[in-house]
Amino acid sequence: MIIPTLNASESLGELIGAVQSQSLPPEEIIVVDSQSDDGTAALAAAMPGVRLISVRREAFDHGGTRDMAIRASETPFVVMLTQDALPADGHWAAALLEPFEDSRVGAVCGRQIPRRDARAFEKAVRAFRYAGQSAEWGMEDLPRLGVRAYLLADVCAAYRREAYDAVGGFEHPIMTNEDMLIAADLLNAGYRLAYSAEAKVWHSHNHTLRQEYARNRLIGEFLARYGDRFAAGAGETGEGLRLVRQVSLELVRGGKPLELIPFWMNCGARLLGNRAGRRRGRGRADGRYDSDG
């Protein structure tokens, strides 16, 4: 299991405890810390069963750092977690690994449950993206699924090491969506992907409009550079419109009509950030994205 960290001292103890108390505990836990200044590295190093790898903060990237950690591991299946994702029960790990019983499955994505302090529209967004029904699919399902065929989030995911190595691992350097890109590589190589609705983690954000804009600008840059790696018909525009419609309907049905305004403002920040990122990403020669102007 691999957990990248940056200033995670407040949450790391609870996370490691939840992981180690699973019905199927991990064979190894690797914490990759990016020069935290709150004692995270020392805390991780002192935890039994945890291996600490330290990297320079400026050298971190979502693809390269995770790839380095995976290649330092020795298990046939590698689980990815982020420091702000917390297993919701003691059977999360077993549920996440269960789809690998099908030897064709190269990677599995878990289900993200909104935290109790999440805004109403954030809860509805998570419900739209992470449904209550497990699924498995291959490249033949892409016409039906569209961009959802690339559903894979390293917030909570697991990889078959053999499949990971076969497709060359994560692209790097890259600063976002390394998971979506390797999902495309795995599907193109003939592997199947799976979603485990029973592998639940608490994870959500109450982003400001500025944060949402910045995050989606990175995604826009990513799509400008790597869009041709995804099959035709997998564009995110139609999925985004479905999300807006469904979440808006759920807010009205749930008696939260006032949440429509902040939700639509949030969507506007996403759209503007995505468009700005696409403009900025066209013509860039490398895959490393930053957040400056």
Image (tube, rainbow, N blue to C red):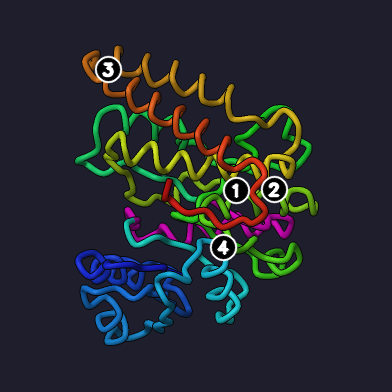
What residue lies at 57% left-to-right and 35% top-to-bottom?
279
**Residues in magenta, as a range:** 85-109
Which quadrant would residue 262 be assigned to in this image? Answer: top left
Q: Amino acid at mark 4?
A: Gly
x and y percent of residue 60 in the render? 47, 68
Looking at the picture, tell me which residue is in the foreground, 284 or 128. 284
Q: CA distance from mark 4 to mark 3?
A: 35 Å
Give the side of residue 178 with respect to residue 39, left or right: right
Which residue has dot 4 on it?
Answer: 63
Q: Is residue 277 above or below residue 190?
A: above
x and y percent of residue 136 in the render? 64, 43
* In contact (CB < 8 Å): disc 1 and disc 2: yes
Sequence-wise first label, 1 or 3: 1
x and y percent of residue 65 in the render? 52, 70
Q: Nearer the viewer, mark 1 or mark 4?
A: 4
What residue lies at 41% left-to-right and 57% top-to-bottom?
92
Looking at the picture, tell me which residue is in the foreground, 290 or 223. 290
> In the rendered picture of this protein, how many numbered marks are placed on residues?
4
User: Could you say which disc has been placed on residue 261 in the image?
Assistant: 3
Which residue has dot 1 on it?
Answer: 180
The answer to whether residue 93 is visible is yes
Using a 10 Å C-alpha cutoff, classify the residue at mark 3 as few (fewer than 14 neighbours), some (14 to 19) or many (20 or more): few
Which residue has dot 2 on it?
Answer: 184
Q: Nearer the viewer, mark 4 or mark 2?
A: 4
Q: CA distance from mark 1 to mark 4?
A: 11 Å
Disc 4 is placed on an element classified as helix
Using a 10 Å C-alpha cutoff, classify the residue at mark 2 as few (fewer than 14 neighbours), some (14 to 19) or many (20 or more): many
Give the side of residue 244 with respect to residue 265, left or right: right
Q: Amino acid at mark 2?
A: Ala
Disc 1 is placed on an element classified as helix
Q: CA distance from mark 1 to mark 2?
A: 7 Å
Which quadrant would residue 119 be assigned to in this image? Answer: top left
